[in-house]
Image (cartoon, grey):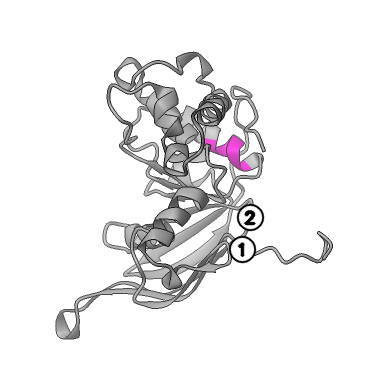
Amino acid sequence: MTAARRHVHPVIQLTRLGKTHGAGDTAVHAVRHADLTVERGDYVAIMGASGSGKSTLMNIIGCLDEPTAGQYLLDGVDVRLLDDYQLATIRNRKIGFVFQSFNLIPRTPAVENVALPLAYARVGAAERNRRALAALDAVGLADRAHHVPTQLSGGQQQRVAVARAIVTEPVLLLADEPTGALDSHASADILALFDRLNADGRTVVMITHEHDVAEHAKRVVRMRDGQITSDTRTAAVTDFPPRYAAVPA
């Protein structure tokens, strides 16, 4: 089969997805009838007030929680058919997570923090180190490879977290309020980095409540009361400074 004819799956395909906690009169419908398709190379911001269902949806997309209704295909794989081991494997290989709180291991050099997903994937030590250094270089922190988190600013720690997220070459970067713990200057740097990663072909889904952050995405999906209420293409911000090296393909 030629490359032109080979079918390429969407990175995310949600069909009538639902998540309900409890049953009967006390049931809480955290996500209801969600339909969402994210193709390769897209950049999507998911927005909503507290209780809108966006965090639950993020957990399902990240294979951290299971839907109670509907279907979720991640890169063509129906995640509801996977056991716990397979879910852990797909999280490690196909999803790169970036969290608000960085989640770095204290007293551990940046290069070792970045290499951790590769260790879980049983990649050899020399190759782990090479790929971790390349990822740090891609986010502009090659000269901080052997610094521990307490020797780095908040923005630098978040860049280490982004390097860790891309080191396995995942199909999806999933970011949860990635600038929430940063000042305005560091936030601008991180958003510029996400812009560049997406320009390099990375698929990005970002959970945020900040409109200026969502403006960097190509699409803004809004949620309310567990439902997707709008899905709008935007004029994404692409005026990022040429500060970072291109991410290796």
The secondary structure making up most of the magenta span is: helix
Looking at the image, residue 193 sits to the left or right of residue 2; the answer is left
Rendering quarter of residue 69? bottom left
**Residue for point 35% across, 58% down:** 64
Which secondary structure, mark 1? loop
Looking at the image, residue 145 sits to the left or right of residue 106; the answer is right
Residue marked by disc 1: 10
**Relative vertical location of residue 82 with respect to residue 108 in this rendering, above or below:** below
Seen from the viewer's position, the closer of residues 188 and 126 is: 126
Label 2: few (<14), some or many (≥20) within 10 Å?
some
Residue marked by disc 2: 40
**Residue for point 59% across, 38% down:** 197
Q: Quadrant of the N terminus?
A: bottom right
Q: How many marks?
A: 2
Rendering quarter of residue 61? bottom left
Magenta-highlighted residues: 194-198
**Residue for point 51% across, 31% down:** 128
**Residue for point 37% across, 44% down:** 177
In the rendered structure, are the residues bearing label 2 and label 1 in contact, judged by CB atoms less than 8 Å apart? yes
Where residue 42 sits in the image (x, y, percent)?
A: 60, 53
Where residue 131 sits in the image (x, y, percent)?
A: 56, 30
Which secondary structure, mark 2? loop
Residue, far left? 26
Seen from the viewer's position, the closer of residues 77 and 119 is: 119
Seen from the viewer's position, the closer of residues 62 and 109 is: 109
